[in-house]
Image (cartoon, rainbow, N blue to C red):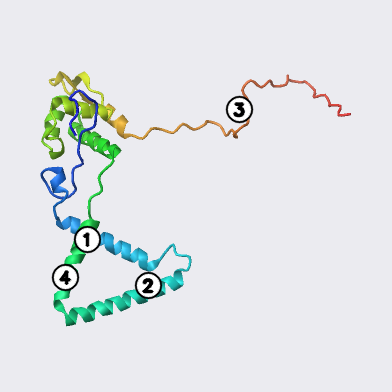
Amino acid sequence: MAIDSEADTLELPPVPEFGTGRPRWAAQRIHPRRLSRGHLTQWARLRAWAVAADHPTRGKTVTARATGLGFGALAAWRTANEEPRLLAVAAGAYAISAWRAGRPVPPTEDELKRRVLLGVQHLIGDRPAVFVREVYDAFQTRPAAAHLDDARVRAVLTQCGITIHKTVRISATETGRSGIKATDIQALLSPAPVDTPSGGIDAGQPDGKGAVEPAEGAVEQPVDRA
C-alpha cells in the first residue's frame, strides 16, 4: 500500500515465519517447518475431539469416538494392503491439509509495533542511545522494510511512538547527531502501571475527607426519638 512519505503510517508488511525473499511470496512456499506445525496442529485437534473434554456426556462420547477411530484405522489398514496406491494418495492429501493448517497467522498492528520496538532495542544494546542513521540502515536490510526510504522508516518509528531526539550522546566521541534513547524504548515496552486506591474504600462510600471529628472531651448527647 503506497502512502505519502510524510505520513505517520505503519507500513511494515508482516515478515513470514517460513521462507525468505518477498514476504507475500515466501508465505506461500511449502516449507518443512510449516508442514510440521500443521501436522502438530491437526493431531492436537484430533486429540481434543477424541477426549471430548467439554462434552456434557463425556464418557459415552469418548467411547463412541474411540470406537469410530478404531474402525477407521482398521479400514484404512485393510485398504492400504489391498490398494497400496491409495496410501500415496492419502499421504498427499494429508500433506496438503497439514500445509493449510500450518499457515502462519498474520500479526496484528500492535504486534508489528512491538517487533519494531524490540528491533530498535536490539540495535541499542547496552548503549544509552543509537543514532537514527544506524536504525535506517539496519531496517532497510530487512525484507519487510527494504522498500522503505529514510522518510518512510522515520514515519514507521513515529507511528510506533518512538521519539527521535535532535541530538543524543552515546559516548565521549559519539554525540551531536539525531537518535533514539534507550530509556524511551524501555518505557514503550514496559506495561503501564495500574492505579489502585491507597485505602480500602467501598464503592459509593465517602472517603472520610472533610469529616469533622468531635472535640476532645465532648460528651455525646442522647437523641430523643419520641
Q: Position of residue 4 (x, y in %)?
A: 19, 25
The Cα atoms of the two marked residues, 4 and 3, are separated by 74 Å
Identify the residue position indicated by label 1 in the image: 98
Identify the residue position indicated by label 2 in the image: 65
Q: Position of residue 202 (x, y in %)?
A: 60, 35
- Mark 2 vs mark 3, foreground winner is 2
Asked if marks 4 and 2 touch (Cβ < 8 Å), the reply is no
Look at 17% across and 74% down and name the residue there.
Answer: 87
Identify the residue position indicated by label 3 in the image: 207
At mark 4, the secondary structure is helix
At mark 1, the secondary structure is helix
The Cα atoms of the two marked residues, 1 and 2, are separated by 22 Å
The Cα atoms of the two marked residues, 3 and 1, are separated by 60 Å
The Cα atoms of the two marked residues, 4 and 1, are separated by 14 Å
Determine crowd level at label 3: few under 14, some 14-19, many 20+ residues with C-alpha closer than 10 A.
few
Identify the residue position indicated by label 4 in the image: 89
Q: Position of residue 167 (x, y in %)?
A: 19, 18
Q: Amino acid at mark 1?
A: Ala
Q: Earlier in the sequence, mark 4 or mark 2?
A: 2
Q: Is residue 50 visible?
A: yes
Q: Position of residue 116 (x, y in %)?
A: 22, 35
Q: Is residue 177 above or below residue 123?
A: above
Q: Is residue 154 above or below residue 111?
A: above
Asked if marks 1 and 2 touch (Cβ < 8 Å), the reply is no
Q: Amino acid at mark 2?
A: Arg
Asked if marks 2 and 3 touch (Cβ < 8 Å), the reply is no
Q: Is residue 128 visible?
A: no
